[in-house]
Image (spheres, grey):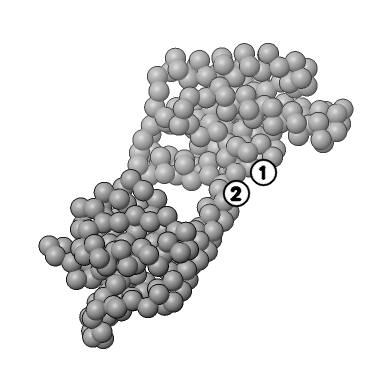
Amino acid sequence: MIVDDEKFNIEIVAAYLKEENYKLFYALNVQGVLKAVNKKEIDLILLDINMPDVDGLEICRMLKSESKTKDIPIIFLTAYQDVEYISRAFEAGGVDYINKPFNSVELLARVKTHLQNRAYLEDIKAKQSKLAQLSITDPLTKLHNTLFFESQIKTKLKHEKPFWVIYVKIENFEKVNALYGFHTSNKILKKFAEILQNSCVAKSTVARLYGVHFAMIIKDYDKKTIQNIEKQIFQNYRLSEDLCNAFSYLVAIKYIQKPTTLDNIYKILQNSLENVKG
């Protein structure tokens, strides 16, 4: 996007950039800038410093203060060559500056470089996001893992918000492994994980803790809703002949409302499973 209060300057810059087939947007003032960044996907901004009403430095600060626009690289267009003024441009958040009158070779080179840098940074961010997601995901079932489950429990305990935990354990799964082999056993585990996920209410945490142990964290619903979730799990389980014929499972349900610890919650759930098992 090119931002300048002089249309003539915009036309000059646009003429150079059109040679590289860039998709261009224009703005004459701060209102035009804010409207564009809220409606368009802007990869880079060429911003004149000397603007009426709100100057380029202040516009840059405004954009850098918003999460949606803070990562857009801003190259200042300026007739100033004073070192102190240029320093203020960088302090405001600019990544570069180009002196007027424009040199087309320099302009195109700087734009290309900063677009490449942005693409590189976006690629890094995407990979980091993927790694972060993998770190909290069970690789087999694609449910959340123990790390995420425990972090959610700790957060709720910290904020003293009541919640439900449904703890599910598959029984005698070693027989399934012996009878069908690991490949088929893994498919069965994945199918059961889907049942748990599909049986739960929205915005709940469904996790595979380890092996044949699963758990759900559900917010402070009434008891009937929780009972309906348990029924839904059982109904979906019964509808799957592969699962029904392969194994049974135990369920423990606990409402956590008093101050406690993660370790204590695990103990309570384990004791409840033992009581269910008899």
> Residue at the location (53% across, 41% down)?
149
For badge 1, the amino acid type reads: Pro
Q: Is residue 162 left or right of residue 232?
A: left
Q: Are marks 2 and 1 in contact (CB under 8 Å)?
A: yes
Mark 2: few/some/many CA within 10 Å (<14, 14-19, 20+): some
From the image, tell me which residue sits under label 1. 139
Query: Which quadrant of the structure image shows residue 140?
Result: top right
Q: Relative to 9, say whether 235 is above or below.
A: above
Q: Nearer the viewer, residue 109 or 193?
A: 109
From the image, tell me which residue sits under label 2. 134
Residue 31 place in picture, x, y as percent: 20, 53
User: Alpha-carbon distance for marks 2 and 1?
Assistant: 8 Å
> Residue at the location (75% across, 31% down)?
187
Provide the secondary structure element on which disc 1 rests. Answer: loop
> Residue at the location (22% across, 58% down)?
28
Q: Is residue 101 left or right of residue 114?
A: left
